[in-house]
Image (cartoon, coloured by chain):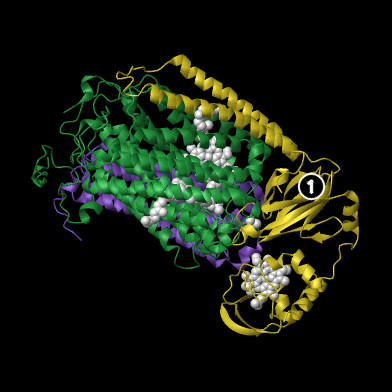
Chain colours: A green, B yellow, C purple
Amino acid sequence: MSDSVLTAGSPGHKREPSYLEMDTGHKGIFAWILATDHKRIAQLYFYSMMVMFLVGALIGVLIRLELMAPGRTIMDAQTYNGFFTLHGIIMIFMFVIPGLPAVFGNFVMPIMIGAKDVAFPRVNLLSWYLYVAGGIIVLVSQFVGGGPPDGGWTFYAPYSVKSATNIGMAALGAFMLGFSSILTGLNFLVTIHRLRAPGMDFWKMPLFVWSLYATGWIQILATPVVGITLVLIVFERVFQLGFFDPAFGGDPILFQHLFWIYSHPAVYIMILPAMGAISEIIPTFAQRTIFGYKAIAVSSMLIAFVGYFVWGHHMYTSGMSETAKWVFSFITFLVAIPSAIKVFNWIATLYKGSINIDTPLLYAVAFIFTFMIGGFTGLIIGSVAQDIHLHDTTFVVGHFHYIVFGGVGFAFFGALHYWFPKIYGKMYNAKLANIAWGLFFFGFNVLYFPMFIAGYMGMPRRYFDYLPDFYIPNLISTMGSWFLYAGIILMIYNLVKARRSGPPAPANPWNGVTLEWQIQSPPTYENFDEIPVIKDNPYTFKKESARHE
Amino acid sequence: MFNGTSPFVDGVDNAFLFIVVISLILLVGLTFLMVYFIFRYRKERNPEASQIEGNVTLEVLWTVIPGILVLLMFWYGWKAYTPMREVPENAMVVKAVARMWAFSFEYDNGRKSDKLVVPVNKPVKVVLEAQDVLHAFYIPAFRVKQDMVPGNPQFVWFSSGKTGSYDVFCAEYCGMLHSAMITKVEVVEEADFNGWYNGETLASDEPAGLKLLKENGCISCHSTDGSALVGPSFKGLAGSQRKVTAGGKETEVTADDAYLIRAIREPSAEVAKDFPPIMQPYSLTDEQIAAITDFLKTLR
Amino acid sequence: MSDHSASPAHAHVHRDDTGSKLGMWFFIFTEILLFGALFIVYSVYRFKNQDAFHAAALNLDTVIGTINTVILLVSSATIAMAISALQQKNKRLAIILMIATLALAGGFLVNKYFEWGAKFHHGLYPGAEHLVSLGPGQNQFFFLYFFMTGLHAFHVIVGMGFIIFVMRQVMRDQLTFDNYTRLENAGLYWHLVDLIWIYLFPLFYLIH
Ligand code: HEA
Ligand code: HEA
Ligand code: CUA
Ligand SMILES: [Cu+2]
């Protein structure tokens, strides 16, 4: 349909010009920032997200250096408070929430269901603009007005209303990011409902698509609540209203309810696509069909649904009613069951496979391991008695880094190594990639495990300074972070080099069976010459399917 | 100090151990299986994969067994929690007031202190109030924690079986010096407590004004040695020329008694230049304020 | 900026009526949850300050409120009729009905303007000495009143923009009797605006 605009493919390859080379009618950078192609938008997200991640990570480095020893180490208290706030906002709202859906969801989901694009390509671009705008607002908030916002990514009132720092602006930025997330979710829902290839019913969708579907529902049904709550905070600050300030009859605990009604489901916005990606990687590298396809698909929906009713577990010490505490604790335990189902099915998928031990599989294994630790510590703090002791201590910080960074982060980088050859048509150096993974995994555990110990000993979080009793775990933790940095820097180096000058990748380097592996690498602008007709379940490994072209 | 005794320590620690043990068994078992499968069924040893699609019995098993386990976990956690809300009738009541960035404690007889002094083996109910923003009252050694919400008093109770000195932290972010909002609970013998409670036994040679500054937490924001903390230092303050913003305009005033009194009772009326308007109004009696201003004048 | 003409980058934008209506419905869900959160805030504070909310509600003008309710209901009907007019190939009538909808929406905003003006005149706005003296409950009532009706008015304005946008497309025959989904979506959105008001009206004006 658009053959007139194709440029010549690189000589020596029989392949068609890819989406990377094709002429969109715009020149230079405009070919990207005005692109509506889902694959290009995925890259826009990827690069902007990596920039934000590196900023957030650099701040993580500085936080760790400050906490290396008691007392002032490298910065003053107010700088520290601004840092962990910015770190949290960036990592949560700009890295792990958009994370896998915006990058890999955008890139492979339409291909996986046999579509040429998402349902609303221009809305897709709009949500990227909102993302960038939100990101810029948050970054600018560091430099103008009352100075870097503090108070943490949770914006608890009334502090967030009273503090002289720039919290209003940061909240506004987070609101924009939420809007961006809503539009992505909406777009994916419609895409999945409307654009599946002929023959692909819901039970033939790859599990990554299932997870995005469940995520989409959370995005459109939970995000507006936090959106309006943040707007209330902004209005309260600008117009001196008192929605949550007790001085005007406001109720700070109500703020926490509204915040967590979104922000707990949000943790499943983060983890579900990660679980989806793992459910793709494992069958591909085990070269066998996934164990318990339906159980995994349904458990995603269950997590999304039950996840709505557990937000109160962040508030056991806030002063809500006793009944609420036990109800929330009870449901919190129930939400662990669907996660358990997934873990068991993944491990069973390895049974009697024919396993290729490649980098993506290593990331998947690391994911399962850290996710289990994160999940089990989640159970510990889901229990009221222990959470009374552990709430707002570094134990909680350990829990969520294990599950957010260890879980979502490992899945993100696993997915990156998995789909990298498809996205760029280049291969990376597998050996370097495995070394980077090893450093990453080792450093990760040394960095975050001591936080459980310090937390159980009673070290509160968001502490710029701490008593000497907590010195040893903090020191170890800081040293662990250095290995982690080494791992990540090596990983980035390896991938950047591969992108520049790696050897060309075949269409199907891992011998995968989902649709994205059946087309050339990198895909053409149109994805498919002919829309495929689907007959089998997505993980049907036949001997003949080994080499497609 | 982390190891204290209170009626909850055993409950919390045992429920914790219960979950940890189950989790460890699962973690080690599942990790072992995963790694074993990867090596046992790697390409070289198992070139042909078996396409097993699932197994309903297994699915049911690994839904039901974790289900039972988590219900047990929930039950232990809840059992360990309920005593925290059941205050014994004979508990001694102490009021704790939090404001940026200090706790102060008030006893029934009006005695005020910046440390929580309690007798050993005596149930103590601490009524928690916050004046400005959220704080949280946290004694790790006793495994108790409760947020302190402005306008909505909360409580915790405990009784300590051992004498000693234990840390009290503020566990809810409350602004710049959140991490410095630390004090102690001193558990002492009954007799020592009564002496402290009723008498001036601990009366030191500190001037009354300084004691008031400590009790009210002023010194967490104001130093007496000239260094600027969150607020201006008290050193050399009295009698000096101050640049302030009053009603949106910058002016200069002399820090006489009247100014100091206003600065304490109505801090937002004149805000010292280069400082944020975050000090809360204090309602102290005339004598107390007089004692403070007298003391401030001695800081040259 | 660069040249937009004949950009193949839009080649993937294809027409799927059901899809775009589905998208609108999802969007409406999010809007309902947006207001849903505010309704929660409202109910909690109403529960805590029953008397104050009661007293404060007496300050609102039920007559203007009722008029505005009727205006919005009628406008919902006119936009629905505009859709069927276009389906029946009656472009002129469709445009007239859309203009009528816009006029009604304008009337709603004018009423709102006078109503808010009166509140300001009586010192019933946030921060006013008179309102502060009435205590926390009444303060909360008026904070919520201004915020929620303000947010609703904002939706009215957005809805008007949407209607103007589709009206221009109808005029230029970009939307026709066999291609009217965008008009339908504007109609759906407008019903949402109406629906929210149907909840706001009793909450603020009627329950005493
Ligand atoms: C990706 C994000 C993510 C995910 C998936 C989770 C998952 C879970 N979280 Fe976590 N959580 C966060 C991110 C996440 N969390 C963040 C960011 C915070 C802090 C916010 C802040 O205050 O800043 C937080 C805080 C937090 C708290 C509040 C702590 C506090 O502030 O006091 C609690 C309390 O209940 C909790 C519990 C849980 C539980 C029970 C799960 C469960 O879903 C976990 C289920 C998984 C498993 C259980 C492991 C796998 C299962 C098996 C191997 C099978 C065998 C197991 C059984 C016996 C069932 N989390
Ligand atoms: C996805 C989420 C995510 C991720 C990945 C991380 C990553 C890291 N976090 Fe995270 N963290 C949060 C989410 C996350 N965090 C959240 C939500 C909070 C709560 C905030 C709050 O309380 O409100 C928090 C809070 C938090 C605290 C607690 C602060 C406190 O309570 O006082 C600490 C302390 O150690 C910490 C440390 C780190 C470290 C060392 C990393 C590191 O692992 C980072 C790793 C990064 C790298 C390894 C990159 C290395 C690369 C470079 C250094 C390259 C240099 C840059 C250029 C060349 C441009 N974080
Ligand atoms: Cu008070 Cu933190
Ligand atoms: Cu949660």
Determine the image quadrant of residue A277.
top left
Tell me the crowding category of disc 1: few under 14, some 14 to 19, or many 20 or more residues within 10 angstroms, Cα based. many
Q: Does C85 appear above or below A141?
A: above
In this orientation, which residue lies closer to the viewer: B234 or A510? A510
Question: Can see residue A272?
Answer: yes
Residue for point 65% across, 32% down: B17
In this orientation, which residue lies closer to the viewer: C114 or A63? A63
Chain letter behind tag 1 = B
User: Is residue A516 shown left or right of residue C199?
Assistant: left
User: Is residue C26 shown left or right of residue B223?
Assistant: left
Where residue A261 appears, x then y in whole percent? Answer: 52, 42
Determine the image quadrant of residue B225.
bottom right
Identify residue for label 1.
Answer: B125
Where residue C34 appears, x then y in whole percent? Answer: 46, 46
Where residue B263 appears, x then y in whole percent? Answer: 69, 75
User: Is residue B172 shown left or right of residue A408?
Assistant: right
Where residue B201 appears, x then y in whole percent? Answer: 89, 62
Quarter holding the C terminus of chain B is bottom right
In terms of secondary structure, where does tag 1 sit?
Answer: strand
Q: Does A375 appear above or below C90?
A: above
Q: Amino acid at mark 1?
A: Lys
Q: Does B52 appear above or below A63?
A: above
